[in-house]
Amino acid sequence: MKRVALAVAALLAATAVPTASVFAKPPQRQSPDLADVIFTEIEKRLIREYYAGSPHAAPDNLPPGIRKRLARGKGLPPGIAKRYLPADLEGRLPPRAGVERRVIGSDVVLVAIATNIVLDIIFDAIKR
Protein backbone atom coordinates (compact mmCIF):
# COMPACT_ATOMS: atom_id res chain seq x y z
CA MET A 1 0.00 0.00 0.00
CA LYS A 2 2.88 2.34 0.82
CA ARG A 3 4.44 1.59 -2.56
CA VAL A 4 1.21 2.49 -4.36
CA ALA A 5 0.88 5.69 -2.34
CA LEU A 6 4.50 6.60 -3.09
CA ALA A 7 4.03 5.83 -6.79
CA VAL A 8 0.88 7.96 -6.95
CA ALA A 9 2.63 10.78 -5.08
CA ALA A 10 5.62 10.61 -7.44
CA LEU A 11 3.34 10.57 -10.46
CA LEU A 12 1.42 13.58 -9.18
CA ALA A 13 4.62 15.44 -8.41
CA ALA A 14 5.98 14.73 -11.87
CA THR A 15 2.85 15.97 -13.62
CA ALA A 16 2.42 18.96 -11.34
CA VAL A 17 5.80 20.44 -12.30
CA PRO A 18 5.12 22.64 -15.32
CA THR A 19 7.45 22.43 -18.21
CA ALA A 20 9.15 25.42 -19.78
CA SER A 21 6.82 25.31 -22.77
CA VAL A 22 3.83 26.10 -20.56
CA PHE A 23 5.41 29.36 -19.51
CA ALA A 24 6.83 30.23 -22.92
CA LYS A 25 5.44 33.38 -24.47
CA PRO A 26 3.30 32.87 -27.54
CA PRO A 27 4.97 33.98 -30.74
CA GLN A 28 4.52 37.68 -31.35
CA ARG A 29 2.38 38.58 -34.32
CA GLN A 30 4.04 40.99 -36.65
CA SER A 31 2.22 44.28 -36.73
CA PRO A 32 0.82 44.95 -40.18
CA ASP A 33 2.75 47.19 -42.47
CA LEU A 34 1.26 50.68 -42.58
CA ALA A 35 0.74 50.29 -46.33
CA ASP A 36 -1.63 47.41 -45.58
CA VAL A 37 -4.05 49.52 -43.56
CA ILE A 38 -4.20 52.87 -45.34
CA PHE A 39 -4.84 54.09 -48.85
CA THR A 40 -1.60 54.64 -50.73
CA GLU A 41 -1.00 57.93 -52.50
CA ILE A 42 -1.43 56.15 -55.84
CA GLU A 43 -4.84 54.81 -54.78
CA LYS A 44 -5.94 58.24 -53.59
CA ARG A 45 -4.86 59.85 -56.84
CA LEU A 46 -6.54 57.21 -59.02
CA ILE A 47 -9.80 57.40 -57.07
CA ARG A 48 -9.93 61.21 -57.12
CA GLU A 49 -9.03 61.37 -60.82
CA TYR A 50 -11.66 58.77 -61.67
CA TYR A 51 -14.47 60.66 -59.97
CA ALA A 52 -13.24 64.09 -61.13
CA GLY A 53 -12.78 63.07 -64.76
CA SER A 54 -16.24 61.88 -65.68
CA PRO A 55 -19.82 62.30 -64.53
CA HIS A 56 -20.79 59.60 -62.10
CA ALA A 57 -23.79 59.10 -59.91
CA ALA A 58 -24.09 61.94 -57.47
CA PRO A 59 -23.04 60.93 -53.98
CA ASP A 60 -25.65 60.18 -51.39
CA ASN A 61 -25.49 62.76 -48.66
CA LEU A 62 -25.07 61.16 -45.28
CA PRO A 63 -26.73 62.72 -42.27
CA PRO A 64 -24.11 64.69 -40.29
CA GLY A 65 -24.43 62.43 -37.24
CA ILE A 66 -23.73 59.31 -39.30
CA ARG A 67 -20.80 60.97 -41.07
CA LYS A 68 -19.25 61.89 -37.72
CA ARG A 69 -19.49 58.24 -36.64
CA LEU A 70 -17.63 57.18 -39.78
CA ALA A 71 -14.12 57.20 -38.35
CA ARG A 72 -10.88 55.35 -38.75
CA GLY A 73 -10.52 52.45 -36.32
CA LYS A 74 -14.25 52.08 -35.69
CA GLY A 75 -16.77 49.69 -37.13
CA LEU A 76 -19.10 50.78 -39.88
CA PRO A 77 -22.28 52.25 -38.41
CA PRO A 78 -25.14 49.75 -38.71
CA GLY A 79 -27.52 50.24 -41.59
CA ILE A 80 -25.24 52.61 -43.45
CA ALA A 81 -25.66 52.53 -47.24
CA LYS A 82 -22.46 51.38 -48.88
CA ARG A 83 -21.61 50.58 -52.48
CA TYR A 84 -18.71 48.87 -54.16
CA LEU A 85 -16.36 50.92 -56.31
CA PRO A 86 -17.13 50.72 -60.03
CA ALA A 87 -15.51 47.65 -61.60
CA ASP A 88 -13.38 49.68 -64.02
CA LEU A 89 -11.96 51.75 -61.14
CA GLU A 90 -11.39 48.67 -58.98
CA GLY A 91 -9.50 47.12 -61.90
CA ARG A 92 -7.06 50.05 -61.97
CA LEU A 93 -6.25 49.80 -58.26
CA PRO A 94 -3.73 47.35 -56.83
CA PRO A 95 -5.33 44.22 -55.35
CA ARG A 96 -5.52 43.93 -51.57
CA ALA A 97 -6.10 40.85 -49.46
CA GLY A 98 -8.51 40.99 -46.52
CA VAL A 99 -9.83 44.48 -47.23
CA GLU A 100 -12.36 46.06 -49.54
CA ARG A 101 -12.91 49.56 -50.81
CA ARG A 102 -16.43 50.92 -50.46
CA VAL A 103 -18.24 54.13 -51.35
CA ILE A 104 -20.21 55.64 -48.49
CA GLY A 105 -21.90 58.91 -49.34
CA SER A 106 -19.21 61.06 -50.96
CA ASP A 107 -16.38 59.21 -49.20
CA VAL A 108 -14.38 56.13 -50.13
CA VAL A 109 -13.42 53.85 -47.24
CA LEU A 110 -11.02 50.96 -46.81
CA VAL A 111 -12.69 48.31 -44.64
CA ALA A 112 -11.31 45.10 -43.09
CA ILE A 113 -13.54 42.31 -44.38
CA ALA A 114 -13.27 40.12 -41.27
CA THR A 115 -14.06 42.81 -38.70
CA ASN A 116 -15.90 45.50 -40.69
CA ILE A 117 -13.49 48.04 -39.15
CA VAL A 118 -12.76 51.22 -41.12
CA LEU A 119 -9.03 51.32 -41.80
CA ASP A 120 -8.83 54.53 -43.83
CA ILE A 121 -11.13 57.14 -45.40
CA ILE A 122 -10.80 59.44 -48.38
CA PHE A 123 -13.23 62.20 -47.46
CA ASP A 124 -15.13 63.92 -50.29
CA ALA A 125 -13.66 61.70 -52.99
CA ILE A 126 -16.85 62.12 -55.03
CA LYS A 127 -17.65 65.74 -55.80
CA ARG A 128 -20.94 67.00 -57.15
Image (cartoon, helix red, strand yellow):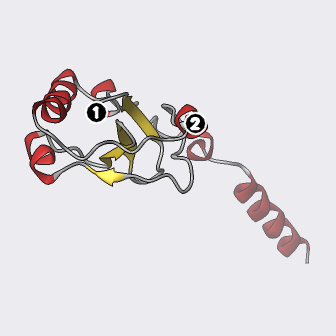
Residues under numbered marks 1 and 2 in contact, where contact means CB atoms less than 8 Å apart: no
From the image, tell me which residue sits under label 2: 69
Residue at 17 percent across and 24 percent down: it is: 45
- The label shown at residue 8 is none
* Amino acid type shown at disc 2: Arg
Q: In this view, does 15 lie above or below 67?
A: below
Which quadrant holds residue 126?
top left
Front-lying residue, 8 or 17 = 17
Q: In this view, does 29 lie to the left or right of 69?
A: left
Front-lying residue, 84 or 42 = 84
Residue at 45 percent across and 39 percent down: it is: 118
Q: In this view, does 100 lie above or below 10?
A: above
From the image, tell me which residue sits under label 1: 128
* Amino acid type shown at disc 1: Arg
Q: Is residue 108 left or right of residue 11?
A: left
N-terminal label among 1 and 2? 2
Q: Which structural element holds mark 2?
A: helix
> Going by the picture, which residue comes out furthest to the top?
41
Q: In this view, does 103 lie to the left or right of 72?
A: left
Q: Which structural element holds mark 1?
A: loop
**Residue 68 visible somewhere in the drawing:** yes
Q: Mark 1, residues whose alpha carbon is within 10 Å: few (<14), some, or many (≥20)?
A: few
Alpha carbon distance from label 1 to label 2: 22 Å
Residue at 39 percent across and 52 percent down: it is: 82
Residue 37 horizontal/vertical position (percent) = 35, 32
In the rendered picture of this protein, how many numbered marks are placed on residues?
2
Where is the N terminus found, in terms of image quarters? Answer: bottom right
Residue 44 horizontal/vertical position (percent) = 22, 26
Residue 15 horizontal/vertical position (percent) = 71, 59
